[in-house]
Amino acid sequence: MRSGYVAVIGRANAGKSTLINVMVGEKVSIVSPKPQTTRDRILGVLTEEDYQIVFVDTPGIYKARNALTDMMMKTTESSARSVDFILYVLDGHDGIGEEDFALIRKYKSLHIPMAVAYTKIDIMLKENIPPDMAKFSDSGLDVDVFPVSARKGKNVNALKEFLVKQMPEGEKVFEQDIVSDKSERFMISEIMREKILLKFDKEIPHGIAIVINNFELQENGVYDVNLDIVCERANHKAILIGKQGRAIKEVSSFARQDMEKFLGAKVFLTTYVKVKEDWRDKIGLIREYGYDEPKE
C-alpha cells in the first residue's frame, strides 16, 4: 500500500482546483476563472485498492494585499513544508515566465520531491508546447513536467500513475469513502461563493464571505439553508441584490441547484446580504468568518 500527501501549489488561477477535482473524481474545491478562488487548505482524497493520495489544495500564490490574502499565503507556505511531494501547477496557456522558474526553484529548495503539471493544453496553441518544454531544459531545473488538460482529461492518468509511484509505503490516512476533510456545511458555503465569483466582476466577489446561519436536514428530507453574504461596501450590497432583487435571486437559484446536486436532496435556501466594511483587514472578523492561521 502506498499512501501520502501531495501539495498542489502554483500561481493564482493556474488550474489547481480543477486538476484536483478531476483526479479525485469528485468536486472537493470550487473553481472560477478568477484569482483567489481557493482561500483555505482543502484536502482531496483519492483512494484505490493499493494506494491513497491526499491532495492538498492551496490558495494561489498571490501578492498579499490585505490580512486575508496574507493569511492565505501563509497557508500555502505551511502546506508546502509538510507533505511527501509537491506538484507545481503552471498555466501553460499563459506561457512560462521567470516568475514561475523562481517559484519552482524556491519550492525545490525545500528538498521535497517535486514535479510540474503544465496545464490548460486544450486551450493553447500546440506549437507553443515544445518551446516551453525547451525552456525547462535550458533552465537547468531537474524536474519532471507533465503537459495536461484537466477539463479534457488528457495525460491526467499518466500524471496520477507517476504520483502514485512517488508515495511512500504506508497505511491509508482516511477511510475508503472519504473524499475531503471539509464538511457539507463548508461546501455549501463554498458553492454559494463560487456562484458569486462567476456572476460578478471586479473587486466585489473577492470581498465576499459566506456565513452559514442554519444548515439542517428537516423531517421532510429538505435541507434548510440560511446564510449571510457579507460584503465590504454599501454599493457592493446594492450590486449584489440588483434591481428589484433580481441579481441575488439569480445567483441564489444557481447556487441552490448545485447545493441540491451536491447533497442529493432538495434545498430551501434563504440568503441575506450584509455589509462589514474592510472585513478582510480585520483579524477578528476573518476568524469569525471561518479563516484562520495555518496549523502545522
Image (cartoon, rainbow, N blue to C red):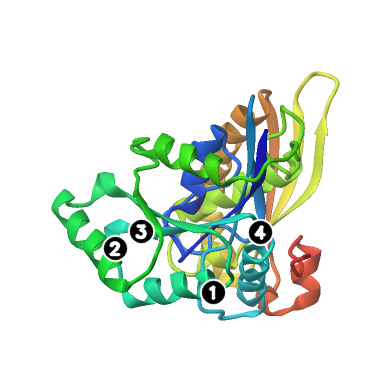
How far apart marks 2 and 1 lie (CA) works out to 25 Å
Of labels 4 and 1, earlier in sequence is: 4
Q: Residue under circle 3? A: 91
Please tell me which residue lies in front, 22 or 220.
22
**In the depicted view, which residue is nearer to us: 113 or 274?**
113
Judged from the image, the secondary structure of the residue bearing numbered disc 2 is helix
**On the picture, is 205 further left or further right than 174?**
left
Q: Is residue 96 above or below residue 254?
A: below
Q: Nearer the viewer, residue 29 or 172?
A: 172
Q: How crowded is mark 4: few (under 14 residues within 10 Å), some or many (20 or more)?
A: many
Give the spatial CA distance, label 4 vs label 1: 24 Å
Identify the residue under disc 1: 109
The disc label shown at residue 40, or none? 4
Report the mark closest to the observer, 3 or 1. Answer: 1
Q: Which amino acid does label 4 sit on?
A: Asp
Q: In which quarter of the image is residue 105?
A: bottom left
Quarter of the picture containing the C terminus is bottom right
**What whole-number distance in Å separates the C-alpha atoms at marks 2 and 4?**
24 Å
Q: Residue 143, position in %: x, y?
A: 41, 60
User: Going 76% across and 62% down the picture, which residue do you hit?
Assistant: 289
Mark 2 surroundings: few (<14), some (14-19) or many (≥20) residues within 10 A: few
Tag 3 and tag 2, C-beta contact below 8 Å:
yes
Q: Position of residue 146 (x, y in %)?
A: 36, 49
Mark found first going from the N terminus, 2 or 1 = 2
Residue lying farthest to the left in this orientation: 127
Name the side, left or right, on which 130 lies relative to 105.
Answer: left
> What residue did someone put label 2 on?
94
Residue 277 in view here: no
Q: Which residue is drawn at 38% across and 73% down?
A: 101
How much space separates mark 3 and mark 1, taking CA atoms? 22 Å
